[in-house]
Image (tube, rainbow, N blue to C red):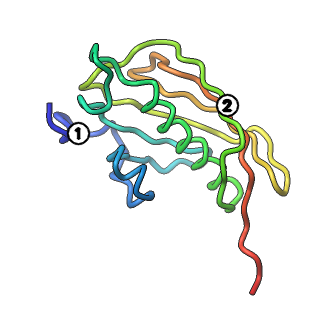
Amino acid sequence: MSDKPAEPPPEGFVLSGSRGAFSTHNGPYYHRETSEGAQQAFHAVARHCNGVGLIHGGMLSAFLDGLLAGAAHKATGASPITMHLSIDFLDMGRAGDWVVGEAKVTRSTRDIAFVEGRAHVGGRDLARASGVFKLMRRRPD
């Protein structure tokens, strides 16, 4: 299976720009603008899967980490750095699936954001995650 999606992304999702070398290598990722939280997606291909053809837990972990950080950035305007990430794996996805993620900030302070999210295929949850992010802000020059 090639890296090119066999079908277009879910409605409203567009290709995301550069997100750094690690995420660019894992992608491509797609996003959809929302008024609240963050929504992202990726098309699972063979390189995202383990030896038995299921989406690798490491891929879902990297996806959820970026998704939750995106929600923290959108809500605060700061650059979020992962302090803690907890993931519950609930079901399995396969190559060919469009994995969609949604996340929102549940609480934030000046320096820390608490975020919850999920990754799903067709509404069937593959994983749920919660994270704590240090909010890095630019110092005035």
From the image, state whether disc 2 or disc 1 is nearer to you.
2
User: Which percent across, then down, holds residue 56?
Assistant: 39, 24
User: What secondary structure is found at the residue carrying circle 1?
Assistant: loop
Kindly give the residue lying farthest to the right in the view shown. Answer: 109
Give the spatial CA distance, label 2 vs label 1. 29 Å
Label 2: which residue?
A: 130
Identify the residue at horizontal 47%, vertical 38% (top origin).
63
Label 1: which residue?
A: 8
98 sits to left or right of 108? left
For disc 2, the neighbor class at 10 Å (few under 14, some 14 to 19, many from 20) is many
Identify the residue at horizontal 74%, vertical 56% (top origin).
135
Q: Tell me if residue 10 comes above or below residue 140 in the rendering.
A: above
1 sits to left or right of 13? left
Quarter holding the N terminus is top left
User: Which percent across, then down, holds residue 126?
Assistant: 47, 19
- Disc 1 residue type (three-letter): Pro
User: What secondary structure is found at the residue carrying circle 2?
Assistant: strand
1 sits to left or right of 81? left
- Disc 2 residue type (three-letter): Ser
For disc 1, the neighbor class at 10 Å (few under 14, some 14 to 19, many from 20) is few
- The quadrant in which residue 11 appears is top left
User: Which percent across, then down, holds residue 141?
Assistant: 74, 87
- The quadrant in which residue 132 appears is top right
Q: How many marks?
A: 2
